[in-house]
Image (tube, rainbow, N blue to C red):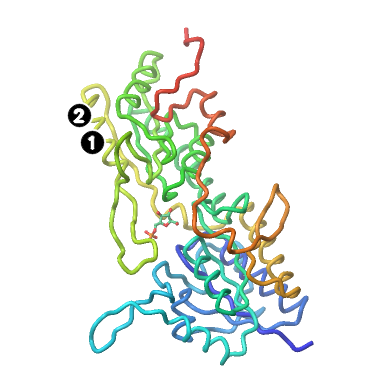
């Protein structure tokens, strides 16, 4: 059989584990299957501009633990709707044919695409026009359907947990209310998992609209018990009952142009008006620290499993699929069944929502299910 040539690209926001997948995929493809690899730089932009580098055992060594992507990334470039300048004017065009030609010219047999919903939607679209693709699920938000978990999520939860531990000491020492904003787009996975692990008192997620009055009520309950500090974890996509998301900026040339942000400041201001006499309130935005630094051991292992399975799928020529984790086992699904809608928390069935309520965490909604009060 002829030696295959595999191309790799990383699209969307960076997430811890990208390098671990690149490392495992490269090693497995070269050492087990004898393939050759290249990596396109800055995601789909590199594919369009034919900007790539070889991926070898030498230039991928020692990257398993490192965050970021040695191939760089971009969360702007959709080649099916790409901004180009024609006669001095910016226009949006489908330039996927240029990408397909670049792949043909390089003799690429399969394109391995590491990304979240936006990146994998393009992967599905490239598959539809005849490119052999394999998807690998990345995002700290964990909002991709058809997989138990995406790589990057665990590291982000660890970072949130550690930050909450640090913030507790200040909150407790100064009797403060600290409102901690975490990422996650329109899904509350990071807030829910990080909030429980970091002992937050109030967790606000997009899936459960909150009211400021319910937040104040929880703070007052704590005051009565002598707990004069409160840690609130708020997902960037959380919404007040009847309200809309808090938008930080609009990035027009991005497939998903809305950048959420600012809700911690908004809630802090509202609380200041209501209980500012009794409490000092501080917003803290964890922002991109949640995607930075070293990859957690869990994400290193998950990424290695994904990379190794992706190489197997390439070898078996099972294209148009995304590697995934199903009930803890490595598997794959059709890309077609993954893209297009987000995986959000089902607040009726998710066990951790119930666990949080059992712990007395408030979601800023009305539901209180304690039969007995603290003495
Ligand atoms: O999807 C990952 C993510 O970090 C989201 O949690 C966040 O809303 C968004 O990307 C931030 O994007 P940017 O890096 O463009 O600010």
- The answer to whether 33 appears left or right of 348 in the picture is right
Mark 2 touches mark 1? (CB < 8 Å): yes
Q: Residue at x 24, y 89 (%)?
A: 87
User: What label sits on residue 136 in the rendered view?
Assistant: none
Q: Is mark 1 within 8 Å of ligand 1?
A: no
Q: Residue at x 76, y 77 (%)?
A: 31
Considering every residue shown, the one lying at the far top of the view is 375
| Residue 78 figure quarter | bottom left
Tell me if residue 27 can be seen.
yes
User: What label sits on residue 269 in the rendered view?
Assistant: 1
Q: Is mark 2 within 8 Å of ligand 1?
A: no
Question: Element under label 2?
Answer: helix
Image x and y of residue 158, in percent = 53, 46
From what the image shows, is residue 172 above or below residue 264? above
| Residue 168 figure quarter | top left
From what the image shows, is residue 290 above or below residue 60? above
Q: Residue at x 38, y 29 (%)?
A: 364
Q: Quadrant of ligand 1?
A: bottom left
Circle 1 packing at 10 Å, graded few (<14), some (14-19), many (20+), is: some
> Where is the N terminus found, in terms of image quarters?
bottom right
From what the image shows, is residue 56 above or below residue 340? below
Image x and y of residue 27, in percent = 70, 74
Tell me if residue 62 can be seen.
no
Closer to the camera in the image, 8 or 103:
103
- The answer to whether 324 appears left or right of 174 in the picture is right
From what the image shows, is residue 259 above or below residue 102? above
Question: Element under label 1?
Answer: helix
Image x and y of residue 105, in percent = 56, 92
User: What label sits on residue 273 in the rendered view?
Assistant: 2
């Amino acid at each position: 059989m002829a030696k295959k040539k595999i191309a790799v690209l990383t699209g969307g926001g960076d997430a811890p584990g990208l390098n671990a997948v690149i490392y495992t995929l490269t090693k497995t493809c070269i050492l087990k299957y004898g393939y050759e690899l290249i990596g396109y730089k800055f995601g789909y932009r590199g594919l369009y501009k034919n900007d790539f580098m070889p991926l070898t055992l030498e230039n991928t060594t020692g990257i398993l633990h490192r965050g970021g992507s040695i191939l760089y990334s971009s969360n702007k470039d959709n080649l099916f709707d790409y901004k180009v300048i024609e006669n001095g004017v910016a226009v949006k065009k489908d330039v996927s044919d240029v990408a397909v030609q670049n792949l043909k010219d390089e003799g690429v047999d399969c394109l391995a695409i590491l990304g979240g919903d936006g990146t994998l939607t393009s992967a599905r679209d490239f598959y539809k026009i005849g490119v052999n693709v394999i998807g690998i699920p990345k995002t700290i938000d964990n909002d991709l359907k058809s997989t138990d978990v995406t790589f990057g999520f665990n590291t982000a939860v660890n970072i949130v947990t550690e930050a909450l531990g640090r913030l507790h000491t200040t909150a407790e020492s100064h009797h403060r209310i600290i409102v901690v904003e975490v990422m996650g787009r329109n899904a509350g996975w990071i807030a829910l998992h990080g909030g429980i692990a970091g002992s937050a008192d109030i967790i606000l997620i997009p899936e459960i609209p909150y009211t400021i009055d319910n937040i104040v009520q929880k703070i007052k309950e704590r005051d009565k018990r002598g707990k004069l500090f409160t840690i609130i974890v708020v997902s960037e996509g959380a919404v007040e009952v009847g309200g809309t998301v808090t938008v930080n900026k609009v990035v027009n040339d991005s497939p998903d142009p809305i950048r959420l942000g600012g809700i911690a400041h908004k809630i802090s201001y509202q609380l200041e008006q209501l209980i500012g006499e009794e409490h000092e309130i501080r917003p803290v935005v964890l922002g991109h620290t949640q995607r930075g630094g070293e990859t957690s051991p869990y994400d290193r292992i998950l990424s290695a499993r994904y990379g190794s399975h992706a190489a197997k799928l390439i070898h078996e020529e099972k294209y148009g699929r995304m590697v995934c984790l199903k009930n803890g086992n490595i598997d794959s699904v059709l890309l077609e069944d993954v893209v297009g809608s987000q995986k959000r928390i089902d607040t009726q069935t998710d066990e951790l929502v119930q666990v949080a309520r059992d712990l007395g965490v408030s979601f800023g909604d009305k539901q209180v299910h304690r039969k007995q009060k603290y003495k």
